[in-house]
């Protein structure tokens, strides 16, 4: 189990190792085709901040070679907000006085039909709080049977389960599982998850082993940026990914980096990751693992997401409603973009903002003239059509150099 292997790495020693990386370490990592963990730490270190241009060029080449010019789109469907956990940052916290809903199978079917009227999505992410009595394996199996006629690829983001339960869901049509470790800091983990099954660090971190042993086709991983030092957490996730590839080599993998921003009246993150840093870690992961699926959600600004399409990102979420219940059955005819209903639920995870320059540019009614491929430029292609597989732009577009101001918009990670 990975919890045993994790004990060989001290958190503070890993943090110090990342901070000690030099420009020579970054250049050596960029010169290699197959990277190890030391190389990965160099690419996410502060020393790599001056090397984003060569990282972008290499990430672009590798993305095109492995994934071509396509972006896989998935759409989340929240089926229950009932939860027994008390995560300090989450709107589904058991102590929060919100209206709890668990959809019936008829309501799930109605949601499927509404989604199919929106666009021909084929990848569905089923999301639920963690309340075994209400939304456990029996309920999820029924949901899979209900949604299977509407979608070809079914993924769940729910509570960690026993291996036998994953095997049962695989037989019922399950394709993938997404699970966020949130943080790999074993000692601090309980501070953020004081009660409920999620408070047990080993049960959660070893859940990926149970998924792999059960034959789950695709496993999604993620850490919540804002709880602990993001470079150290990302490095631990990279080690975890290497461990899983070594032990469950038939499985496909994806990674995600949901980030929190300061929100008035909400949970305040300990650290804030800028747009430039998110671009850095995205490109570093592409260089570290050529085949891993890197996913962005509607939490990120549409302009920033489009800018990162060719620099490592290979899948994105479409419109998301973060509380269970009826969604709009049709899009406005005037809308041509992938958008969210923006329900302020689930957690204090507002989406990131862009730099003031980009914010000002976005008010224009026409796209700007294309800029040269540089991380200091701000440019983006025309909006892609809303479909389950959207073509990436025909030339490299880069992200904004930094994020200097932020807004408060609560959003889920999906």
Image (cartoon, rainbow, N blue to C red):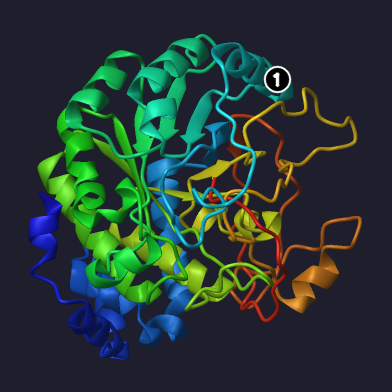
Quadrant, the C terminus:
top right
Read off the residue under disc 1: 114
On the rendered structure, is 342 left or right of 139? Answer: right
On the rendered structure, is 250 left or right of 310? Answer: left
**Residue at disc 1, secondary structure:** helix
On the rendered structure, is 296 left or right of 36? Answer: right
Q: Position of residue 321 (x, y in %)?
A: 66, 38
Task: Give me the residue at 49% from left, 32% from top.
Answer: 125
Rendered view: 323 above or below 91: above
Q: Position of residue 79 (x, y in %)?
A: 54, 29
Rendered view: 325 above or below 185: above
Task: Give me the residue at 52% from left, 55% from top.
Answer: 90
In the image, 145 versus 70, the foreground residue is 145
Q: Find residue 281 and report its image quarter.
A: bottom left
Q: Position of residue 21 (x, y in %)?
A: 27, 87
Task: Give me the residue at 55% from left, 74% from top.
Answer: 276
Q: How many residues crowd around disc 1 within 10 Å: few (fewer than 14), some, or many (20 or more)?
A: some
Regarding residue 386, the answer to whether it shows in the image is yes
Regarding residue 291, the answer to whether it shows in the image is no
Q: Position of residue 405 (x, y in %)?
A: 70, 78
In the image, 366 versus 218, the foreground residue is 218
Counting labels gives 1
């Amino acid at each position: 189990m990975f919890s045993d292997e994790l004990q060989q790495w001290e958190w503070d020693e890993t943090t110090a190792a990342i901070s000690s990386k030099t420009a020579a370490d970054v250049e050596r990592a960029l010169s290699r085709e197959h990277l190890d963990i030391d190389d990965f730490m160099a690419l996410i270190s502060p020393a790599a901040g001056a090397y984003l241009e060569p990282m972008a060029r290499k990430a672009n080449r590798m993305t095109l070679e492995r994934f071509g010019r396509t972006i896989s789109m998935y759409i989340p469907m929240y089926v229950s907000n009932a939860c027994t956990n008390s995560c300090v940052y989450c709107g589904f916290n058991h102590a929060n006085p919100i209206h709890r809903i668990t959809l019936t199978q008829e309501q799930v079917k109605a949601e499927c039909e509404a989604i199919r009227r929106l666009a021909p999505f084929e990848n569905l992410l089923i999301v639920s709080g963690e309340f075994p009595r209400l939304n456990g394996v029996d309920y999820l199996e029924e949901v899979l049977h209900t949604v299977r006629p509407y979608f070809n690829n079914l993924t769940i983001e729910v509570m960690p389960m026993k291996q036998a339960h994953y095997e049962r869901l695989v037989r019922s049509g399950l394709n993938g599982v997404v699970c966020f470790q949130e943080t790999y800091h074993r000692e601090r983990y309980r501070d953020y998850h004081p009660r409920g099954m999620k408070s047990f660090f080993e049960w959660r971190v070893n859940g990926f082993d149970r998924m792999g042993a059960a034959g789950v086709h695709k496993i999604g991983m993620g850490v919540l940026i804002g709880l602990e030092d993001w470079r150290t957490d990302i490095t631990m996730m990279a080690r975890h990914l290497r461990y899983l590839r070594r032990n469950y080599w038939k499985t496909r993998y994806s990674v995600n980096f949901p980030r929190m921003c300061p929100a008035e009246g909400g949970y305040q993150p300990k650290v804030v990751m800028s747009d430039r840093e998110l671009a850095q870690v995205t490109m570093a992961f592409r260089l570290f693992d050529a085949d891993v699926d890197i996913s962005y959600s509607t939490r990120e600004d549409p302009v920033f997401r489009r800018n990162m399409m060719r620099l490592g990102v290979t899948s994105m979420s479409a419109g998301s409603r973060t509380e269970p219940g009826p969604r709009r059955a049709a899009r406005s005819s005037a809308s041509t973009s992938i958008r969210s209903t923006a329900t302020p639920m689930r957690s204090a995870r507002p989406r990131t903002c862009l730099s003031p320059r980009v914010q000002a540019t976005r008010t224009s009614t026409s796209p700007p003239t294309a800029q040269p491929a540089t991380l200091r430029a701000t440019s983006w292609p025309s909006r892609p059509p809303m479909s389950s597989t959207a073509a990436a732009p025909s030339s490299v577009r880069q992200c904004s150099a930094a994020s200097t101001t932020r807004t408060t918009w609560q959003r889920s990670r999906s």
